[in-house]
Image (tube, rainbow, N blue to C red):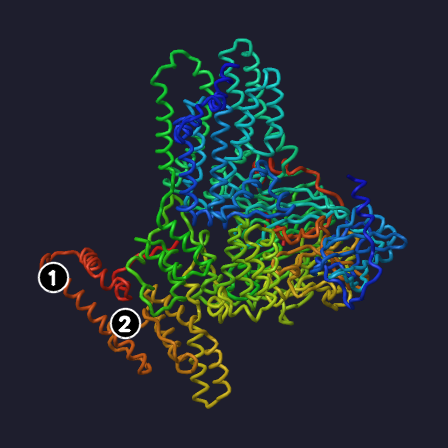
């Protein structure tokens, strides 16, 4: 026993003994050893990757985790086992708001795991890399997440396991140092105190300590009885203590789950399987894969516990054993890379989200162009941005609009990811608020939900409700400034309509209430559902008033017509184009053109580029159609007619060439080839979208 | 530490030089000029105005309690003394605020202390004010004399599964040896305690459209009336009511816990019958009815009801019941809200049998989502009705109940922020009017700012539920007793 402890403490002694006049690198090498240098390099590199490459992800994680400086919040969090871990976890997560700082804290915690692992299991310097096994397992449990970040139900997830392992390692270290007699009472106290604090981690660490005791006892005959007895007691404690707390302390914990509290895997089960969409074979398979980091964590500790005995076995003291740490490091690196979720669309969505909060709409469009095959969320974000940077620019419709589903084994839904933002930006305040509320019920309030609840209710004029959420946000460390800005707006409501965050959403927040429903983000709701019916109704009423010579009634309805903003009309027209709904498009266009005539302030408004392309397309397809338009508008459209003719001619030419070469070519194949050949020149036009972009995937 | 605290606490001095502000202090929650029972927990509140310092003085007889700070939390012992001294009289409260070294004093407000005590316990469901999602639901009971709160049952006790909703807790005669609540979806059924014996009952039958929903224990006889409902919800894009919860079908049934039978009371296909409630003598059943006609064969019943949601108006009817034969009399109109263009829901008869308390709104049955919904009283002795003006607000008031002596009412209101329903208590006068309602006191002044769940279905109780949540969980996880449909009763 004492010999092993001596081995474990050699690092410090050797540092003292290192030569005085050496080069810097020699000095570092002497201090840390090669393995120590590798470890240091790894942690520095990890910090860099997290702080810079994954900075948007860290910011998003901060936006999805709430920590409040409030007693009620503390009481709520600690009302379940492992709640204190969640509380501390949420506290630490908030520093991801500044990715460099947050990453530094996170990496420091992982280093602490490495350090304590060496201490708890007496790992000598020449085997130091073995202590990286739990570090990689913990890291992988976080880096594998991807879209899971939206679905986690365990508050403070990113730190819960890390903190639990740190506490467990401290306990293991202490346990190893204790004499046989004290180990049993130590376990008893540990499980009773630890279960409310750490949940199942207290049970697992208790068992691990008992197993350590068994391995150590293999070398010490005198302590075998103690070790076996302690192990038996540990088993009993693990079985009875959670049940004790179930019957006498906690009123909101399922007996069937008392042995899982604190393990996120179980939480995922609960959250995910509820929705039938997730109940697929691939989902269950991925769930199995998902748990692997936690199994690896357990396995690494079992191996390290076994090493307490194995290192004393002479047969294993071979020279080739010195390469074992390097093999372990290589395996860890491969494992770490396998479990690092790396998806361009996911990263772009997070960058777009951040840019939208910062009001950088140009960046939102630019990020979208980085996506080879974007998700629908990326396309919607881009389209929202184009409403701001200008619909006369190219890019509202694109060759990549037949978007892919998020790269995730589960059925990711837009309303869980960013749909509430989308609804807000499209002026659908009640629906924005609804999904903030629904999501908060499933996943707890998060800054992202709170902020959307605030701004949607400010836009809806429900200041009392907005203030409630502002008050909560003011108890956060990094979202309070935003909350105070919103509070100032409420105090000066005349400024709301001109505020950069509200300007466009408010112009889209009109003009009639509709009773409908959505199961996810519905683009028909964003397209101002029923606005067409009301527009038609208004047109008819105005026409009737005109023919009856009732000027007052005419003005009344004309005023309502005028109150509909140009942006609202633009969105109303663009959405049928997305759905390729020609009839609805012309209804909106008709209303738009009438407003154009009635509303003098709109005379400078240009029909969006995609609409002009659509008009030229539809009028070519539907030759009998005529439209009353101002000469300026007609001129604008005639340019596109030329362009469409060019597109049309090229399609015909490609078709002719292909049919000439391959008379039996199938229509689908022909279309695919034509789409590819025309993509460069026409990929950003509505004609291209209309003919070649199929199978838009909303979710 | 304690002595230090006392020293600090005693050192707070009431400002001697100040200027008067000719208005009541802005408090959150608003406890100005309310009437409270003699056994209520301390009223904690926040002075909702920016200032550098705050002093609040409570005074009753010779007793003075002075508290410094924005958040005013009187200790249980001081409050108890104040109540005792002021019983049948009032506690005077002065609020002083200081800015730039200058003190100002708001108009003194009073807290009237009624000599009438209130039932010691209430129970309610805590639920997020969401629409589709629910995650953690609890039925809680609260001691009104202090802040003690216990869980009666939590759906997290059966969290391993596809989700569980719990609702509609109800008691017979304010006692807990006969009570019930429903569990939906996972391990669903009605947890029914009959003379102290708890069982899970499956109230569904082939002849009824659903399991039991809104319950009413007959106070004298061993039967329970339920509505059975098919309910849906749709969402407004702009209206700040945000949601419409509608019944597309609903009937009334009667459950006999001795025979384990259910039978129809009212099931006209053109009527939506709901919210049954018994008179105190157990011989009259009140309920609400809306007549709906869905004649457009090209549309579903649901879509027609959604389109015409504003036209669905509920009236209050009653039917006599003969406990000997078990037969009901003919329906009799009590309050024809539809003739006023309104919709009346949740009738509750006062313990003395004289007043009917109900919620009145413009349309529909789910008034807790209707901003215009207010509480009204109908005098059964003369047919007059009136709003409870001092208890109502500009926001939704709905689910309400009478205390066992009929001197207090408890109801849910969204007035604090427009979205979260909170519980309010109001003193009822003998003439059927009320005093100003006050929010259920909580131990912390900012409790209502941070507590993110609504209080739902508040009920008075004279004793706490003594079956533990874990015992309920075990019963719920077990098998249920299935009822039979009995067609003989009409």
Q: Marks 2 and 1, how far apart in space?
A: 26 Å
Chain letter belonging to callout 2: A
Residue A44: where, in percent of width, then height? Answer: 42, 38
Is residue B258 shown to the viewer in this render?
A: no
Quick one: which residue is furthest to the right in this view? Answer: B62
Report the side of A650 relative to B229 (left or right). left
Which residue lies under the disc numbered 2? A618
Crowding around mark 1 (Cα neighbors within 10 Å: few <14, some 14 to 19, many 20+) is few
Q: Nearer the viewer, mark 2 or mark 1?
A: 1
Crowding around mark 2 (Cα neighbors within 10 Å: few <14, some 14 to 19, many 20+) is some
Residue A587: where, in percent of width, then height? Answer: 37, 74
* Nearer to the camera, B10 or B288: B10
> For numbered disc 2, what is the local secondary structure?
helix
Residue B376: where, in percent of width, then height? Answer: 71, 64
N-terminal of the pair, mark 2 or mark 1, is: 2
Chain letter belonging to callout 1: A
């Amino acid at each position: 026993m004492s010999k092993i402890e001596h081995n474990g403490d050699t690092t410090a002694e050797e540092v003292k003994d290192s030569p005085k006049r050496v080069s810097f690198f020699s000095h570092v090498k002497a201090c840390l050893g090669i393995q120590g240098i590798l470890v240091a390099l790894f942690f520095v590199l990890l910090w860099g990757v997290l702080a810079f490459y994954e900075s948007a992800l860290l910011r998003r994680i901060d936006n999805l985790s709430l920590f409040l400086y409030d007693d009620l919040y503390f009481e709520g969090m600690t009302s379940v086992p492992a709640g204190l871990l969640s509380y501390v976890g949420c506290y630490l997560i908030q520093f991801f708001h500044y990715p460099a700082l947050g990453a530094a804290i996170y990496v420091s915690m992982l280093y602490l795991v490495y350090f304590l692992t060496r201490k708890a299991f007496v790992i000598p310097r020449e085997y130091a890399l073995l202590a990286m096994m739990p570090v990689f397992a913990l890291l992988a449990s976080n880096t594998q997440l991807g879209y899971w970040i939206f679905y986690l139900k365990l508050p403070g997830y990113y730190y819960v396991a890390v903190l639990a392992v740190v506490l467990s390692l401290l306990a293991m270290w202490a346990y190893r140092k204790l004499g046989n007699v004290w180990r049993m009472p130590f376990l008893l106290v540990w499980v009773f105190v630890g279960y409310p604090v750490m949940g199942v981690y207290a049970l697992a660490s208790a068992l691990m300590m008992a197993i350590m005791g068994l391995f150590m006892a293999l070398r010490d005959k005198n302590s075998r009885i103690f070790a076996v007895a302690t192990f038996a007691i540990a088993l009993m404690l693990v079985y009875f203590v959670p049940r004790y707390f179930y019957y006498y302390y906690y009123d909101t914990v399922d007996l069937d789950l008392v042995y899982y509290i604190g393990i996120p895997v179980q939480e995922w089960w609960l959250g995910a399987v509820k929705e039938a969409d997730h109940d697929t074979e691939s989902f269950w398979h991925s769930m199995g894969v998902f748990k692997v980091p936690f199994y690896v964590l357990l396995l690494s500790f079992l191996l390290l516990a076994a090493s307490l005995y194995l290192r004393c076995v002479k047969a294993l003291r071979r020279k080739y054993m010195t390469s074992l740490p390097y093999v372990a490091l290589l395996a860890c690196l491969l494992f770490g890379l396998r479990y690092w979720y790396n998806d361009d669309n996911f990263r772009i969505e997070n960058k777009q989200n951040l840019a939208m909060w910062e009001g950088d709409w140009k960046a939102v469009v630019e990020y979208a162009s980085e996506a080879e095959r974007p998700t629908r969320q990326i396309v919607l974000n881009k389209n929202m941005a184009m409403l701001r940077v200008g619909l006369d620019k190219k890019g509202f419709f694109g060759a990549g609009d037949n978007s892919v589903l998020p790269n995730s084994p589960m059925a990711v839904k837009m309303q869980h990811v960013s749909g509430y933002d989308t609804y807000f930006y499209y002026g659908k305040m009640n629906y924005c608020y609804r999904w903030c509320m629904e999501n908060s019920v499933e996943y707890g309030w998060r800054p992202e939900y709170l902020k959307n609840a605030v701004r949607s209710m400010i836009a809806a004029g429900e200041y009392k409700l907005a203030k409630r959420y502002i008050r909560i946000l003011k108890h956060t460390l990094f979202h309070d400034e935003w909350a105070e800005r919103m509070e100032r707006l409420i105090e000066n409501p005349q400024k709301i309509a001109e505020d950069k965050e509200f300007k466009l959403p408010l112009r889209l927040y009109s003009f009639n209430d509709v009773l409908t429903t959505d199961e996810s983000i519905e683009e028909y709701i964003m397209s101002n559902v029923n606005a067409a019916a009301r527009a038609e109704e208004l047109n008819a009423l105005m026409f009737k008033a005109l023919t009856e010579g009732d000027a007052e009634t005419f003005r009344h309805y004309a005023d309502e017509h005028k109150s509909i903003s140009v942006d609202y009309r633009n969105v109303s027209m663009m959405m049928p184009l997305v759905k390729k709904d020609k009839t609805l498009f012309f209804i909106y266009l008709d209303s738009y053109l009438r407003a154009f005539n009635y509303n003098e302030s709109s005379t400078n408004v240009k029909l969006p580029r995609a609409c002009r392309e659509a008009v030229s397309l539809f009028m070519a397809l539907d030759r009998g159609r005529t439209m009353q338009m101002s000469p300026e508008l007609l001129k604008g459209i005639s340019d596109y007619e030329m362009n469409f003719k060019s597109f049309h001619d090229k399609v015909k030419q490609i078709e002719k060439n292909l049919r000439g070469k391959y008379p039996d070519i199938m229509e689908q194949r022909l279309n695919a080839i034509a789409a590819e050949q025309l993509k460069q020149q026409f990929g950003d036009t509505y004609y291209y979208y209309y003919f070649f972009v199929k199978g838009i995937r909303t979710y | 530490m304690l002595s230090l605290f006392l020293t600090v606490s005693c050192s707070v001095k009431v400002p001697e030089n100040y200027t008067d502000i000719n208005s009541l202090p802005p408090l959150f929650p608003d406890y100005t000029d309310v009437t409270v029972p003699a056994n209520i927990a301390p009223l904690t509140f926040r002075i909702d105005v920016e200032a550098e310092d705050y002093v609040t003085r409570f005074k009753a007889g010779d007793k003075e309690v002075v508290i410094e700070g924005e958040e005013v939390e009187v200790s249980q012992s001081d409050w108890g003394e104040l109540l005792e001294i002021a019983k049948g009289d009032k506690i005077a409260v002065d609020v002083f605020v200081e800015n730039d070294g200058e003190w100002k004093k708001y108009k003194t407000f009073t807290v009237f202390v009624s000599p009438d005590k209130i039932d010691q316990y209430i129970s309610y469901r805590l639920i997020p004010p969401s629409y589709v999602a629910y995650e953690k639901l609890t039925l809680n009971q609260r001691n009104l004399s202090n802040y003690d709160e216990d869980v009666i049952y939590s759906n997290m006790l059966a969290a391993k599964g596809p989700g569980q909703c719990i609702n509609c807790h109800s008691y017979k005669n304010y006692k807990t040896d006969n009570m019930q609540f429903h569990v939906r979806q996972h391990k669903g059924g009605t947890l029914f305690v009959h003379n102290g014996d708890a069982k899970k009952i499956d109230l569904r039958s082939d002849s009824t459209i659903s399991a039991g929903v809104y319950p009413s224990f007959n106070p004298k006889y061993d039967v329970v009336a339920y509505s059975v409902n098919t309910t849906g919800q749709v969402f407004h894009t702009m209206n700040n009511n945000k949601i419409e919860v509608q019944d597309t079908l609903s009937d009334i049934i009667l459950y006999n816990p001795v025979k384990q039978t259910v039978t129809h009371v009212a099931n006209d296909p053109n009527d939506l019958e709901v919210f049954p409630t018994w008179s105190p003598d157990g011989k009259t059943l009140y309920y609400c009815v809306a007549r709906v006609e869905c004649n457009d064969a090209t549309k579903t019943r649901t879509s027609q009801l959604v389109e015409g949601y504003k036209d669905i108006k509920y009236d209050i009817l009653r039917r006599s019941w003969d406990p000997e034969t078990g037969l009901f009399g003919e329906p009799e109109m009590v309050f024809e809200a539809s003739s006023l263009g309104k919709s009346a829901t949740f009738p509750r008869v006062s313990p003395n049998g004289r007043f009917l308390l109900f919620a009145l709104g413009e349309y529909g049955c789910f008034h807790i989502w209707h901003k215009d919904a207010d509480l009204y009283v109908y005098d059964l002795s003369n047919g007059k009705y009136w709003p409870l003006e001092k208890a109502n607000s500009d926001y939704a008031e709905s689910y309400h109940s009478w205390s066992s002596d009929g001197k207090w009412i408890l109801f849910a209101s969204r007035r604090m922020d427009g979205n979260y329903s909170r519980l309010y208590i109001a003193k009822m006068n003998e003439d059927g009017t009320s005093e100003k309602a006050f929010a259920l006191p909580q131990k912390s002044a900012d409790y209502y700012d941070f507590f993110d769940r609504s209080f739902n279905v508040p009920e008075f109780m004279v004793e706490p539920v003594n079956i533990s949540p874990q015992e309920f969980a075990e019963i719920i996880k077990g098998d249920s007793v299935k009822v039979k449909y009995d067609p003989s009763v009409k």
